[in-house]
Image: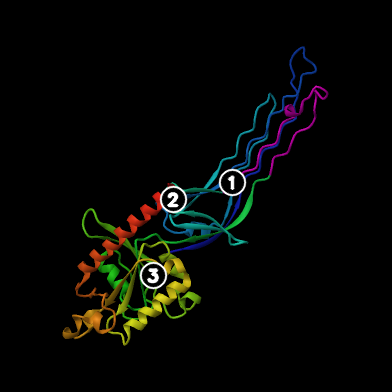
Amino acid sequence: MLIDYAKIHAVAGKGGAGCISFRREKYVPKGGPDGGDGGRGGSVLLAVDPHVRTLLDCREQPRYRADSGRAGQGSNKTGRDGVDLVVRVPAGTVVRDAESGELLADLTKPGDQWLAARGGRGGRGNSRFATATNQAPRRADPGEAGEERTLELELKLIADVGLVGLPNAGKSTLLSRITRARPKIADYPFTTLEPNLGISALDAERTFVVADIPGLIEGASEGRGLGLQFLRHVERTRVLAFLVDAASEDPASVLAMLEKEISQYSATLGEKPRVVVLSKSDTLPPEERDGRGTVVGLPQAHVISAHTGDGLKELLEELWRVIAAESAAETHRENEDVG
């Protein structure tokens, strides 16, 4: 089961207290101050781990407390620093402040790391306070408290193609035919209750990731059905593939509704490149399959049947063409930003 939301409470370690100590040596009855500083408190870090797929661990263990620093010692010995606590999260994790909703971090690739709560500084020992007029200070700082904050973690799947359509539009069947993913498939709406990912390979050099999300219904962008819960998973995709049942009464209206819901949820999402697919062509009489897109007002649509395999090769080639073009455009934009 995909766990794509969790709320956690992160508490960094407290800094160790500074030490009050005086040097004691033979024949030196009044040695100077030699109290060491306290160690730094451990911090709480979020780090992307490629082996972690969901936020299940964060859901089941919502509280994270890092190690505190140790107190300073005599002979100017600094206390040991607290050990940092690393919370491992999947790629695609978005971090927000639980109270304000402010976006704090977007962890998208292995190696990404973010400081969730900073450890407190260690207190200064009394040797730090010695002056010409106060050569035997009996003062030391307590350790600083570590940061404490409540965070919301949200997982947004990272895929090249996002399959969008009404419930029972054939998205899961298509995913199972063009990838090795094995989503639940049945002849009734809302079979897919969580996103599924699969890798499609045209050849050894051309592969891409496809995401199938639960079906959308009208009003999904406002929270109806399961749409709002899962639309976040197509936000990162490069291309949207709109699947419309070729045998539906008005495919053009269905497509318009899907595009409206996507755009209302996110203007950026509505501007992504798209490919229109008329699915389930095997349910039509043979004489109606050729030119079906033109008949229903969608002349650019790819007419396919995931059941028989008709049109799948051409669809995959088109998806790869659009992905490659979008990838090149992204690289160009990044180079312009750097320049």
* Amino acid at the residue labelled 1: Ala
Q: Secondary structure at mark 2?
A: helix
| Closer mark to the observer between disc 3 and disc 1 | 3
* Amino acid at the residue labelled 3: Ile
- Counting from the top left corner in percent of width and height, residue 127 is at 73, 26
Q: Residue at x 42, y 70 (%)?
A: 270
- Marking on residue 337: 2
Left or right, 118 with reference to 4: right
**Residue at the limit of the structure toward the left, as seen here:** 287
Residue 1 visible in the shown view:
no
- Pointers 3 and 1 in contact (CB under 8 A)? no
Is-magenta flag for residue 110? no
Q: Residue at x 46, y 76 (%)?
A: 220
How far apart are the alpha carbons under marks 3 and 1?
37 Å
Q: Is residue 151 above or below residue 178?
A: above
Q: Which residue is mark 3?
A: 213
Of the two numbered discs 2 and 3 on the same chain, state the one appearing first in sequence: 3
Label 3 Cα neighbours within 10 Å, binned few <14 / some 14-19 / many ≥20: many
**Residue at the limit of the structure toward the top, as seen here:** 27
* Amino acid at the residue labelled 2: Asp
- Counting from the top left corner in percent of width and height, residue 18 is at 71, 34
How far apart are the alpha carbons under marks 1 and 2?
38 Å
Q: Secondary structure at mark 3?
A: loop
Label 1 Cα neighbours within 10 Å, binned few <14 / some 14-19 / many ≥20: many
Q: Secondary structure at mark 1?
A: loop
Of the two numbered discs 1 and 2 on the same chain, state the one appearing first in sequence: 1
Q: Which residue is mark 1?
A: 66
